[in-house]
Image: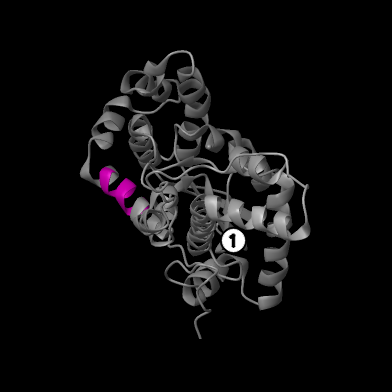
Amino acid sequence: MKIITGLALVAALAGCEQQKSRLDSSSDAKAMANAKSPTAPPGATPPTAAKSDRSGTLEERLARLEDAYDRNAEALDFLNKVYASQKAQQKAQQEQADRDDPAPDAVFAVDVNADIKLGQVDGPATAPVTIVKAFDFACPFCQRVAKTMDDLVKDYNGKVRVVYANMLIHPQAKPAHLASCAAAKQGKYNEFKDAFWEKGYLASQHDPSKMGEENILAIAKDLGLDTTKLKTDMASPECEQRLTADMNEMQKFHVNSTPTFFINGKHLNGALPKERFKQIIDEQLKIAEASGVAGGDYYDKVVLAKGEKQFRSKMDPKPN
C-alpha cells in the first residue's frame, strides 16, 4: 500500500497489491521452503556464557578450551546451520525481487488503443508523451495521485495525455469500473472518474455503501448521464470485457499492484511525487522531439511498434 528510509518509503509508496503477487509467488515459496531454518538436534545443549578460567599453565588452559569446544561443538554446528539458512533465505528473496523488478532500460509496448477509443483518456491525441495509469477505484494510493495526473495534463499544455487502464485489485471497486466504462459510452469518462473519487471512494471511508450501485447512479444523475442506459451498459458484456482486456494487458507486463504507470513505455510504480513524474516526462519529451516523429504518432510508431511486447526483468538480457 514492484524511498524516507529504504523500507519506510517503499511501504509508503508501493500501492495496493493483488493477493497473489510477487510476495508469495511459487518460486519464492519454493526457495524459502528449501532454505528452511534447521531445528535443533535432539539433546543438544545450548552454549552457556561463563567467565573464562585463566588459571593454570598454558597447557592446562589450552586443554580446558579444547574440552569446552568439544562440549559445545554440536550447538555451534547448529548455530552455523541457522546462519547459513538465513543467508540462503535472504539470497532467495533478493533473487526473487530481481526477477520481479522491470528492466530499467525497457520500453514496454502497452496497448491501450481500445481504452483511448472508448474515451478513457485525458489530454490531446497529439501529445508526444502518453502516461498509462493502471488503477483501482478502491485504492487509496490511486486516489492520492489522481490530482497529480490532472495537474500534469494541465502543466504540460498539450504535450501529455493520461490513459486510464482498469486494474481491479479490490472486488468492491468493480461496480465503479463498470460504471466508468458506461459513462465513457456517454462521453463523460473523466467527469465520472473525478466525481467518483470524491463522492464514491472518499465518501466510502465513512459509509462503505457509497461504493455501491445506488450511489453510483446518484453520481451519474448529478453529471447529467442517462442512468437507465448507464445501468444497462454496466451489466453489458462489452464493459465486462473491457475490464478483463485491460487486466490481461497489464498482466503481460507483470502489473500486480496499483497505481502502476508506463510513461511512453517506461515503468514506474506507486504514488510518487509530481516532481518525479515530471523528471521522466521531461526525459521522454526530449527523446520524442529528437525522434522526428509527430507527437500524435509517437506512441503508435515508436512505443508500440518498437517496444517490448512482454515483461523483462532486470535479470533478463536485453533482446536484440
204 left or right of 149 in image: left
Which residue is painted at 41% across and 54% down in the image?
A: 117
Picture coordinates of residue 137, whole percent (x, y) = 45, 34
Q: Work out whether 120 lies above or below 295.
A: above
Badge 1 amino acid: Thr
Q: Which residues are magenta?
A: 240-246
- Residue 42 is left or right of residue 191, and the answer is left
Residue 144's spot in the image, x, y percent?
60, 34
Q: Main secondary structure of the magenta part?
A: helix
> What kind of element bears circle 1?
loop
Image height of 20 relative to 218, above or below? below
Does residue 124 appear in this view? no
Which quadrant of the view contains residue 186? top left
Q: Nearer the viewer, residue 264 or 114?
A: 264
Magenta stretch encompasses residue 57: no
Q: Is residue 238 shown above or below 143? A: below
Q: Identify whether 283 is placed above or below 257.
A: below
* Residue at the image position 45 percent from the left and 25 percent from the top: 223
Q: Quadrant of residue 230?
A: top left
Front-lying residue, 115 or 278: 278
Residue 156 point in image, percent of width and height: 71, 51
Q: How many marks?
A: 1
Q: Nearer the viewer, residue 86 or 2?
A: 86
Which residue of the protein is positioned furthest toward the bottom in this rendering? 320
Question: Residue at the spot x=71%, y=55% of the render?
Answer: 60
Circle 1 is placed at which residue position? 126
* Residue 309 percent location from the top left of the image: 43, 71
The residue at 23%/35% (across/down) is 235
| Front-lying residue, 275 or 26 | 26
> Dot 1: few (<14), some (14–19), or many (≥20) neighbours within 10 Å?
some
